[in-house]
Amino acid sequence: MATKEEQQAYAEKIKPIQPKPPYFINCLKAFLIGGLICLIGEAVQKFYMTYFNFSAETAGNPTVATLILVAALLTGLGVYDKIGQFAGAGSVVPVTGFANAVTSAALEHKSEGLVLGVATNLFKLAGAVIVFGAVSAYIFGMIRYLFQHLM
Amino acid sequence: MEFVWAFLVGGLICVIGQLMMDVLKLTPAHVTTSFVVIGALLDAFGIYDKLIEFAGAGATVPITSFGHSLLHGAMASAEDHGFIGIAMGIFELTSAGISSAILFGFIVAVIFKPKG
Amino acid sequence: MNLQGRQTWKFTNSIYLNAAGTSVGPLESEGPLGSFFDKTYSDLHCNQKNWELAERQLMEDAIDVCLKKTKLQPEDINFLLAGDLLNQIVSANYTARGNGIPYLGVFGACSTSMESLALGALLVDGGYANRVIAAVSSHNATAERQFRYPTEYGGQKPDTATFTVTGAGAALVSKEVSDIKITSATIGKVVDLGIKDPFDMGSAMAPAAADTIAAHLKEMNVAADEYDLIATGDLSGVGAPIVKMLLKEQGIDISDNHRDCGLMIYRPDQPVFAGGSGCACSAVVTYGYILDEIRKGNLNKVLMVATGALLSPVMVQQKESIPTVAHGVVLERAEGGN
């Protein structure tokens, strides 16, 4: 096992050889695709408000459900991973990324059956988001509640 | 005009995520987890609602909005039910999203085959 | 004396590589070496119902083709030395179940091809086997699924990432004369210079390759330019320049005769990031293309150094760095055989 000095020396040595990510292009692609997905979301929301009489508050629900359905289908069709390689965070950060994480994990583990494969692995990748979201909401909620009631 | 803001704000949030991946070398899981916590935090200070007002889908589509909804539902329920309302309301607003993901993810997994 | 120095075997008898079989997936068959592979599939599932069965199919194909070329049956083979990337090397295990050859499972990650070949030659040279088959396999989907993400996941891979080769290679080793000799082998030490990024294996494995190449040249007392080709398994675009740099620091210059299998198996325009990796990378390029070059007389003496990253997803999550190993085998053109 190499010493820490040897490891650091090696890391320095290879820095010039290791390709750096194309920061600007990656950010541009993320911006464009991420923005586009949000744009589509805005259009879908307007659609539900106009034709289905949802209010501004409640239209978010069917909008999110629609985007999730589309992302799940694109994942099943084998298209979303290609979008993801191109867009990076542009496809990971929108809620479509959440749907893709859920669907791709479930799809991949199909060979292990419905219960132990599909169902068990559904939240293999996306579980962290739900856990941390719920835990932080709980903690922030408690803090705010105590604040409101002690002031 | 709302479309422009949706595009710009949504795109910007994704750029922040991209920088977290490229510069800070975080995995997508770490980025989305951070964003959901940030969304909840911004709602704790009442900021995220304002973002939604002017950016529309640019703020509701990114995963940050998930964090916002979790806290929002908790606080709304706390108003009706007191302290225990926090636990009761966490998944109230996000139910559509989580249920859809489970349902559609499951159905797609049953119908399709991974392509590699 | 068969042992040279600390870690090199010089085979006293004449050990021959009699035949080899290769089977690959779609991207590999479309690559620059496509015509050199025995069996190709246009479908990543290789006509099987899941990825693991597909990988097993590839390994079975490679062994089948190898046996057919020498008109032998599984019963004629003493030992099967095989391995792959999957947990518990199941592709190898279940293939061995199928052909009933006394089985020694080996794991060296992507270095398994030369690990198994070296051990096979050792068994034959020591008189402990008449005929050995050394086989390895890897599959892009099974590797992605186990080490990284589900195959349909939309994560973005960096340019330093390598692309696991879908394929399998098998070689038959014995004392029966053929046109390719296995003359020596160097077993590598595990080297870890602190690289933690599983999406940059090239940087992690280059030191191991340099270590093994240097040890081999020293213990066999030969100069680098005595080899027509010193090939590494899968250092790819990032690791290849690093290994040359590391060896230069030790006074060894392989810039003229070095090639990397990971860079040979795919075209630059194929969506493979830094190049190929996986057990099959070194195996199919060696058993498909390099052997052919030796037979044609374009290469006389080749040092094939397969490189492996000995990590697991759990180790990465526990913030461990990536230990790597490289094993080298020397293949030489022989006069005999048909």
Image: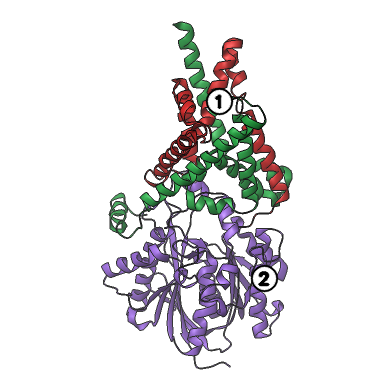
At numbered mark 2, what does the secondary structure look like: helix, strand or loop?
Answer: helix
What is the three-letter code of the residue carrying label 1? Leu
Q: How many other residues sit within 10 Å of disc 1, few (<14), some (14-19) or many (≥20)?
A: many
In this structure image, what is the colour of chain A?
Answer: green
Chain in red on the image:
B
Residue at 45% from the left image edge and 20% from the top image edge:
B46
Q: Quadrant of residue B103?
A: top right
Viewer-closest of C136 and A96: A96
Lateral position of residue C149 relative to residue C61, left or right: left
Residue ID for mark 2? C60
Q: Does the image show residue A82?
A: yes
Is B69 placed above or below C69 here? Answer: above
Residue at 66% from the left image edge and 73% from the top image edge:
C61
Residue at 44% from the left image edge and 49% from the top image edge:
A29
Lateral position of residue C61 relative to residue C307, left or right: right
Viewer-closest of B57 and A22: B57
The image shows residue C19 at horizontal and vertical percentages of 59, 82
* Mark number displayed over residue B70: 1
What is the three-letter code of the residue carrying label 2? Glu
At numbered mark 1, what does the secondary structure look like: helix, strand or loop?
Answer: helix
The image shows residue B77 at horizontal and vertical percentages of 59, 16
Chain in purple on the image:
C
The image shows residue C65 at horizontal and vertical percentages of 65, 78
- In front: mark 1 or mark 2? 1
Q: Does the image show residue C148?
A: no
The image shows residue C39 at horizontal and vertical percentages of 63, 75
Residue at 64% from the left image edge and 28% from the top image edge:
B95
* Mark number displayed over residue C246: none
Same subunit, labels 1 and 2: the answer reads no
Lateral position of residue A60 relative to residue B37, left or right: right
